[in-house]
Amino acid sequence: MAEDREKSSSVDDAAQTASRMQSAYAVLSAAKAGTAAAGSAAGAALGGPLGAVVGALVTNRTFIKIIAALLAAMFLWMFIIANMIGIILSYLGFSNADDFANDAQETQLSMVKTRIEEVLEGEGRQEEILKLLKKERKKKKKEIKADRAKNYPEHDLVIIDEYKTKLVGNLSYYLSLLLTDVWDQSTISSFLGNVLYGDMSTSLTSPYDNYFNEAARTYNVPAALLLAMGMVESGYNPRAVSPAGAMGIMQLMPATAAYLGVSDAFDPRQNIMGGARYISENLAMFKNYPNAMELAVAAYNAGPNAVVNSGYRVPHNGETEYYVQKVMGYLQEGRSSAGTASSETGDTEDAYGLLKNAVKDNLGNFFAWTVSDEREYNGFATRYYFHSESGTAEITKATYETLKAQGSNVSEENIETVRKKVEYTLLLAINTDVQGSAKGYSYKYVTTPGIFQTVLKALQFLKDGITSVKDFLFNSWTDFITGGSEGDSYYGDIDATGDVITYDTVPRCVKRVTYFNQGEEPWASMGYGTSTIGSAGCGPTSLAIVISTLTGQNVNPQMTSSYAISNGEYVSGVGTSHSFPTNAAHHWGLTCERVGKDMNYIMKALKSGKLVVEICEAYTITGSGSGHFIVLTGVTGDGYITIADCASRDRTTKIYSPDTIRSYGRDLAEGCFWVIGR
């Protein structure tokens, strides 16, 4: 009997399951049919009047739009919460959360550079470092001449030497890039030393000693000093708020916290890191004064301007003097009485030893070479002749000189001829790409960068008021909520949000450009030699823009990067060879002419429907230490130039004067512009 009951129960369960599946199928069918009758049928399948109501609701299109809007709002809120740290940092001026770490890295780079300059002040030291580099440069030049003899024996040789154009004039900068790349943190700290203070200690301890020590290592300031300041400022209370509004352990004012990249002033680690950065900047500002530390601490309390306006003394305002005395009172007597380090040679001998060994061990990382151009040109050749009674014979220059000295009947003649020239570039291979290279930090989007930017835009609308919120919901999200078309989204005068950019330029200019961004997926993480397209692929991405636009083909950055690699036009640690734009253009059936900084010629080319690729010098359009390729797309009615910058949609939205574009161009013998046409 028990068996029969179990069988009966199984049959009933199966029947109920089948019934539920039929009901679900009926509801789906009703919704798909979209009719009231079908809705009623679905309701009946669900059972009773309630089911009929549900059936009517799910077939009502207004109801579906409302549900979609609610879901959109829910997803928007989820994205806001998931990306809150990045959003806050963006409003503080950081493009993403990595920038906070990179800012500390830039600060350290600046400190290393300053220390190198101090170390190289010793007699003969800079000359000794340059002697090592010249020896390595000489080796590379021998390699260039051997390659020319083998592959271009009939070509005149031109060498663009970045040792002269870049390295010599910025030696401390490039050495600092090398040291921060090859040294670990402990070696960097040893090199920097206590340049503003001697041995320093304190008996103070706190619950946040790990954060104080991390901040001290990051910004090269004594942990004892930070502990003393934290004690005086707040007694290590992370929730402390002063009557003036200063917050946290190190008592950061809101504006100062924002400047220092501190998004949450009540977070102990962020607050201590921000305070360490601020005092390190003050120490650097007053390092040449005998009481540098007292002035730096006073500036932390009253502001650097107050110290300067007091004649580089601790301000007599009744508060700052007492503050400085309390901070200094917590520090032990191991501190140097002068407060500053001497610049005598002996005090930097160990640091110079570290520097010299680093250069010796990494000489192979300094230089690389590549064939940057090869062409024919109209020139003149000198022919030498010996005249005698039996006739005229062509002779060598050496024979000509000998016979001429003897008074023989000789002559010379300049003949116009087609000559060949090969250009080699002796590249400075030190990696200048500091941004985005901070180690030990990571930041991942929970969603895509595009949606993340939409969230930022939504927050801006929220800030602007309820009217903007309504406009945002009913315009920007129209496509998602109702299936309609989304309104235009512009930055300035040029819409750079889509993959095709339309420019308002004079007749015959290219009006529509196919745009790729090297920093956006899928391109950003794709490999390019020993790097990625996102980090080093501005050349291939710019050519992908040009080729796709002018040919109508879909030639993406991955394709142009692969061509550059297979054609030997990627230099490890440096980037794309200057021969690449010409060769890539010809490979895809386009014309290309490399020219100098004649902006009238460039403007004329743009007005004739051509595109122009420009190689920009470091510290120009991007503000970084690396060169950068951009595309000039046309000329506006009032004489400005439009561009497509593969690294920035924001820069792509702007227009530039011809003089600005000219100033960006790198000074190269063969020119920094490539005029490309059909």
Image (cartoon, helix red, strand yellow):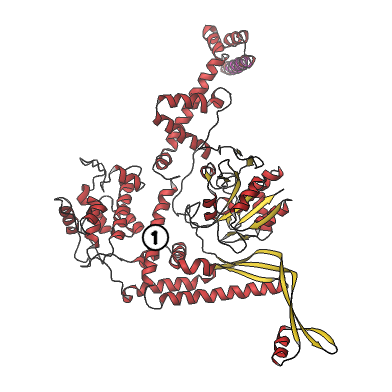
Of 180 and 281, the residue lying toward us: 281
Of 217 and 425, the residue lying toward us: 425
x then y, percent, for residue 45: 59, 11
Q: Which residues are magenta?
A: 7-29
The picture quadrant where one finds residue 160 is: bottom right
Image vertical order of residue 475 relative to residue 138, above or below: above
x then y, percent, for residue 149: 70, 74
Image vertical order of residue 39 relative to residue 359, above or below: above
**What residue is at 41 percent from the left and 56 percent from the top?**
106
Of 672 and 567, the residue lying toward us: 672
**What residue is at 53 percent from the left and 16 percent from the top?**
63
x then y, percent, for residue 457: 46, 34
x then y, percent, for residue 636: 58, 41
**What residue is at 59 percent from the left and 8 percent from the top?**
40
Q: Residue furthest left?
A: 318
Amino acid type indicated by mark 1:
Ser
Q: Tell me the residue that label 1 is attached to.
A: 110
Of 513 and 448, the residue lying toward us: 513
Residue 479 lies within the magenta run? no
Instruction: Answer left or right for 453 relative to 276.
Output: right
